[in-house]
Image (tube, rainbow, N blue to C red):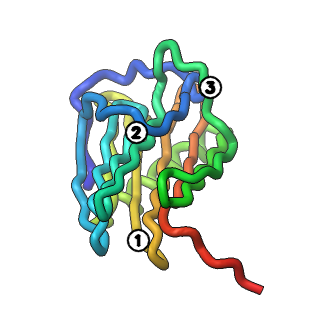
Amino acid sequence: MLTTLKTSYTDTRAADLAWALGREPLPALAVLDLELSGASLQLRLLGASHQVLLEEEGRSCSETVACMPGSSTPLPLGVSKRVGEWEYEFAARVETLSHGSFAGRAQELLALVADHPNGLAGTFPGSPHAFTAMLAQRHEGQVRWRTWHAYPQEGQLVVTRTRIGARMPATL
């Protein structure tokens, strides 16, 4: 699903994004509710930020990547931790692209997410390459999602990948 967010593009910089687990739902500009094989997942666009709410078998988890005033937890490159009975893994990277490459990458990502049944993307009025996009799936008993936060004024794209679910057995 592709939507135009009813707000101006005023988010700061990629470097100002912070990460948090367990936050209460924040006001969202767009929401997509999904059922993925018994898991209820809500993808939430918070401007150039995102929040994911997951519920399954009486357990819940929330992930927030946003510019959060007063947050002392910057966007980490990676996190691996237990959340109740689940294993949670998060990874983030920042891609810096030339103006032309950025525009092409933005178009690719928006096309990928816009028509996907488990995708949500929001663009900002007057700035076609400023967007936030999210894509979720269920794979081997785990819920996974990817996000893209675009900062065209810096030529930066923040890419995150999350995986949560039962602990995967080690393979020999």
Quarter the C terminus occupies: bottom right
67 to 95, vertically: above or below: above
Whichever of callouts 2 and 1 sits on the residue coming sooner in the sequence is: 2
Of badges 2 and 1, the one in the foreground is 1
What's the mark number on residue 138?
Answer: 1
Residue at left offset 46%, top offset 55% = 109
Whole-angstrom CA distance, mark 2 to mark 1, is 19 Å
**Amino acid at the residue labelled 3:** Ala
Q: Do the residues labelled 2 and 3 touch (CB within 8 Å)?
A: no
Of badges 1 and 3, the one in the foreground is 1
Residue at left offset 39%, top offset 33% = 23
> Residue 55 occupies which quadrant of the picture?
bottom left
In the image, 167 versus 103, the foreground residue is: 167
87 to 79, vertically: above or below: below
Residue at disc 3, secondary structure: helix
> In the drawing, does residue 85 fall left or right of residue 52?
right
Seen from this angle, which residue lies furthest bottom? Answer: 172
Quarter the N terminus occupies: bottom left
**Amino acid at the residue labelled 1:** Arg
Residue at disc 1, secondary structure: strand
> In the drawing, does residue 5 fall left or right of residue 130?
left
Residue matched to label 2:
50
Residue 114 can be seen, yes or no = no
Whichever of callouts 1 and 3 sits on the residue coming sooner in the sequence is: 3
Residue at left offset 62%, top offset 25% = 15
